Image (cartoon, helix red, strand yellow):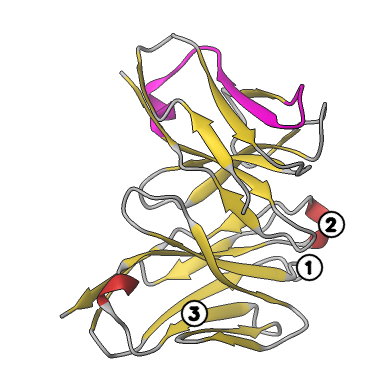
Amino acid sequence: NAGVTQTPKFRVLKTGQSMTLLCAQDMNHEYMYWYRQDPGMGLRLIHYSVGEGTTAKGEVPDGYNVSRLKKQNFLLGLESAAPSQTSVYFCAIRTGAQDEQFFGPGTRLTVL
Amino acid sequence: GENVEQHPSTLSVQEGDSAVIKCTYSDSASNYFPWYKQELGKRPQLIIDIRSNVGEKKDQRIAVTLNKTAKHFSLHITETQPEDSAVYFCAASKDSSASKIIFGSGTRLSIRP
């Protein structure tokens, strides 16, 4: 089974503060994704990566940056947090050749 | 880009009855359609998926059907049980897009005892 961890599990920020969310996998999967989940809106793709050193924009990239310096880790950064970024953030990996995505446990972020 | 619409947003069925959730997609090039189940406070988990080269797939009490011409697909749960209560998401993807999955807005399914 793929192992995906997310750090932290919960966080409260004040408007304007910055933070980084970490997604780590214990396998060697190339594709990693960051989603946000808001009530009534499903999951929306923020950024994704198809391999070490690569990143690309998803549906809702504004206000976020990402980096994939190591294959195992995919970082999501908020440079200046806004209340609109209050959400649950999920990381996912593609686990095989057939598109299936496996999700991490999520990070609940509140921006006051 | 792809757009996935999902209906209904909430669904309540009697235990033992069937539940059907329907989705439509906009991009005719989409060829992979997964369904995820998310229990309260948990991560979404893949429960079944279908590819565009088949019209139906079944796994015990759950089945998915795909109509490529009409660009819609459905999830069917038979003999519902209390543990089926959750939010269900449909999604669509195409091979050429780095497996980017576009999700529907979700259906909250409640099973009445």
Q: Quadrant of residue B99?
A: bottom right
| Percent of width and height locating residue A86 | 38, 29
| Callout 3: SS | strand
Q: Decide which of A15, A88 is in the foreground and name it.
A: A88
Q: Which residues are magenta?
A: A68-87
In 3D space, how far apart are the residues under numbered discs 1 and 2 (Cα atoms)?
9 Å
- Circles 3 and 1: CB atoms closer than 8 Å: no
Residue occupying image coordinates x 68% and y 28%: A73
Residue B75's disc number: 3
**Residue A83, magenta (yes or no):** yes
Q: Is residue B102 above or below residue A72?
A: below
Q: Is residue A7 above or below residue B60?
A: above
- Circles 1 and 2: CB atoms closer than 8 Å: yes
**Residue B105, magenta (yes or no):** no
Circle 1 marks a residue in which chain? Answer: B
Mark 3 crowdedness (10 Å alpha carbons): few <14, some 14-19, many ≥20: many
- The amino acid at mark 3 is Leu
The answer to whether B24 appears left or right of B105 in the picture is right
- Circles 2 and 3: CB atoms closer than 8 Å: no
Q: Quadrant of residue A34?
A: top right
Circle 3 marks a residue in which chain? Answer: B
- The tag earlier along the polypeptide, 1 or 2, is 1
- The tag earlier along the polypeptide, 2 or 3, is 3
Question: Do the dots labelled 2 and 3 sit on one chain?
Answer: yes
Residue occupying image coordinates x 60% and y 52%: A102
Residue B96's disc number: 2
Residue B29's disc number: 1
Residue occupying image coordinates x 63% and y 49%: A2
